[in-house]
Amino acid sequence: MVMAGLATVVLGGCRNDEPAAAGGPEAAGAAGGTEAAPSPELTGSAELRCLIEGSPWHVSTTDLETQLQGVMRGIDVTGVHMTGDQTLTVTPALKATFTDGITTTITADLGGGMTMRVIQRHSGTASGGWQADGNTLTPQGAWTGGIKIDSKVTINGRSANAPIPVPENPLGDVPMTYTCVDGVLNLQAQGSPFVYLFR
């Protein structure tokens, strides 16, 4: 994910597994009067409620630009610029949907009169379930979709495509930690140096 994590896309085909409310009071009586389990936003921590109630979230590209420049050591990066949007939607049942449409442009001075420009385009949507355990969000079940990454590298005007292979559903394989307070969400995938700031 340079989830840069991350144009809102509404996925079709969403299912509602709750039984239909047709039949009025008689149907409720036939069900034996059992109550549905409370949803996470009613029983979880304040941070979990913040995660759900703040949805949809939009990533801070400005913050990601600063982080990206900071982790690129051994190369003289002269500029990092991001356009587009990455969104995260979380439902009360903890179904998460990431939509990524960010384009990142990195320029660097390679020395000896050589300048490199890398343009990386992200596109796609990935969706699936989470289980919350404290401040850890663990993927549950199968995740659908995926984020495609295409890169183009130009050195002194000569360019080549540099596709980056990524797992089909990496978001469905990686636990994440989060904090969420006052409309600010910080999300970090396990093993990633980036902390994705969403508002």
Image (cartoon, rainbow, N blue to C red):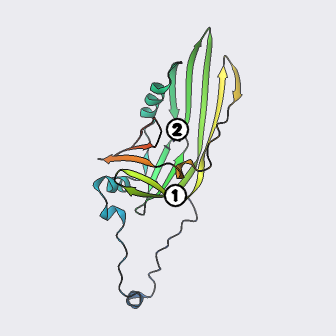
Seen at 51% across and 28% down, the residue is 81
* Horizontal relation, residue 36 to residue 111: left or right: left
Q: Which disc is residue 2 wearing?
A: 2
The residue under label 2 is which amino acid type?
Val
Near-viewer residue (16 or 8): 16
Residue 35 versus residue 147 in the image, above or below: below
- Residue 95's mark? none
Residue type indicated by callout 1:
Gly
Q: Earlier in the sequence, mark 2 or mark 1?
A: 2
Task: Please identify the quarter of the rendering in which residue 49 is found.
Answer: bottom left
Q: Give the answer, above or below, for where 175 lies relative to 119.
A: below
Residue 9 seen by the camera: no
Task: Kindly tell me whether residue 112 is visible in this rendering.
Answer: yes
Direction from residue 164 to residue 43 in the image, left or right: left
On screen, residue 160 versus residue 54, left or right, reads right
Percent of width and height locating residue 26: 40, 91
Q: In x, y percent, where is residue 70?
A: 45, 25
Q: What element carries label 1?
A: strand
Judging by the rendered image, the residue that carries numbered circle 1 is 128
Image quadrant occupied by the C terminus: top left
The residues tagged by marks 2 and 1 sit, at their Cα atoms, a distance apart of 19 Å
Which residue occupies 44% across, 47% down? 176
Q: Is mark 2 on a helix, strand or loop?
A: loop
